[in-house]
Amino acid sequence: LISRNPQEEIKRAEKYTYNPTKTDKILHGYLPNLTAYERFFQDNGRTYELHIKFSIPKLLFQWSIKEVGNEDFEQTVKLIKLKLERLSIETTENAIRKAIVSSAHFCKNMELAKPKTVLDAIRQLHKAELGKGKKKKWRDFDGDGQALYFHTTYANIIIYDKIQEVLGPQSKGDDKEDRIETERQILRSLDKDQLPEILRFEARFGKQVSLDAFLSKVLNKKVNGITFEEIFDVALSKKVLLKIWNDITDRPTNQLALKMEQSIDEIFDAMLLSTTPEDRKKPHSLNKLLINVLLLALINKSGAGVLRKKVEKGWDERTWKRLLKKIAESSALFKSVPDNQMIADIQIALDKFDKYDWKPQVDT
């Protein structure tokens, strides 16, 4: 990287890309995607930047399901240097260590105990929302797998079936140009009952400014360009993913949406038991109890987004904003009602953050 003052006038710029072909992958194994920028200045000077995009598990293990640890950093650096040399690009290990990260994907694999399925977990999480204007969408892997996307101003949050994502068609998926064919072949050789239910929780930061801003919040210090060496840290990944998960689950609307499913009779009985005779003597106590029971039942059934649309259509946006205060009160009242079990399992997995490693034994 040759840098100059960003305020200097650029005469023109050129962009060059390299995406590995099937032949390249056969000859050299997994290879990174490259984008090079050449900028020409008025004084005939030039600058060069090389952006390298790669998956660390695929680079190290040729197996995207296995997670990496801090102990894998030096081997990662050596392999990146080797792969670049095979593409006739010279660099140093120190340059790779100190390279500034402009985009990053943080992720955690979690295996669900059968008969629970990833699809069941995603259906529960689909009831959550991050507020009006924050888009949410489904993606389908040919009918078998599902992915849930939350689009925020800082990152794309994706919850998906990792096994089905690997098995999906080559023409589909966010990493369709980055697939490991041997991985697909191994999984396809197994019976369905041999495949685990692996939920992946992932946050994708596509811009350096968003990544730096979010890391500044997580680390409680100003981040203005984080190096590859600094970001290759399991503890940091845990902090990032827990912060994002808590941003979802701490919203009062989502706290009601992600509670254990109960009938309206069970909810009413639980609320009745939680009140004292003195509480019931207070003015409007029954009305307040019924409002809280109904809010939990409605939001827990379909999610706050559905209720918000109905309220805004029948009344207006200000009515919904006023109702949010009631929802916050209801969330506090129902604190003792347990979360849906799969939501609780995800919380436990993120809290523990154990390194996940699953690879089947395949007869050769």
Image (cartoon, grey):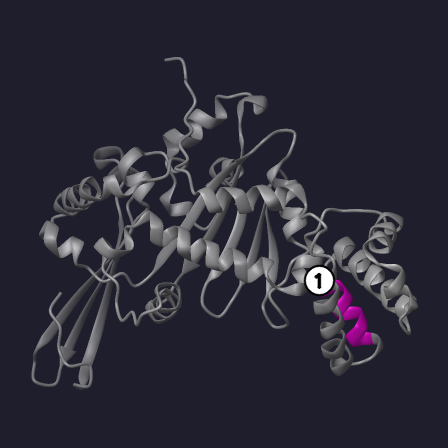
Residue 294 in which image quadrant: bottom right
141 lies left or right of 31: right
Q: Is residue 142 above or below residue 182?
A: below
* Amino acid type at mark 1: Ser
Q: Which residues are magenta?
A: 305-313
Q: Is residue 77 above or below residue 63?
A: below
Residue 108 position within the rendered picture, expressed as x and y whole percent measured from the top left: 44, 45
35 lies left or right of 90: right
Q: Residue furthest top?
A: 363
Residue 36 position within the rendered picture, expressed as x and y whole percent measured from the top left: 21, 62
Identify the residue at horizontal 81%, vertical 63% (top origin).
292
Verify whether residue 306 appears in magenta. Answer: yes
Residue 193 in which image quadrant: top right
Identify the residue at horizontal 31%, vertical 70% (top origin).
221
Q: Main secondary structure of the magenta part?
A: helix
153 lies left or right of 34: right
Identify the residue at horizontal 49%, vertical 59% (top origin).
244
User: What residue sits right under mark 1 in the picture?
Assistant: 331
Q: Quadrant of the C terminus?
A: top left
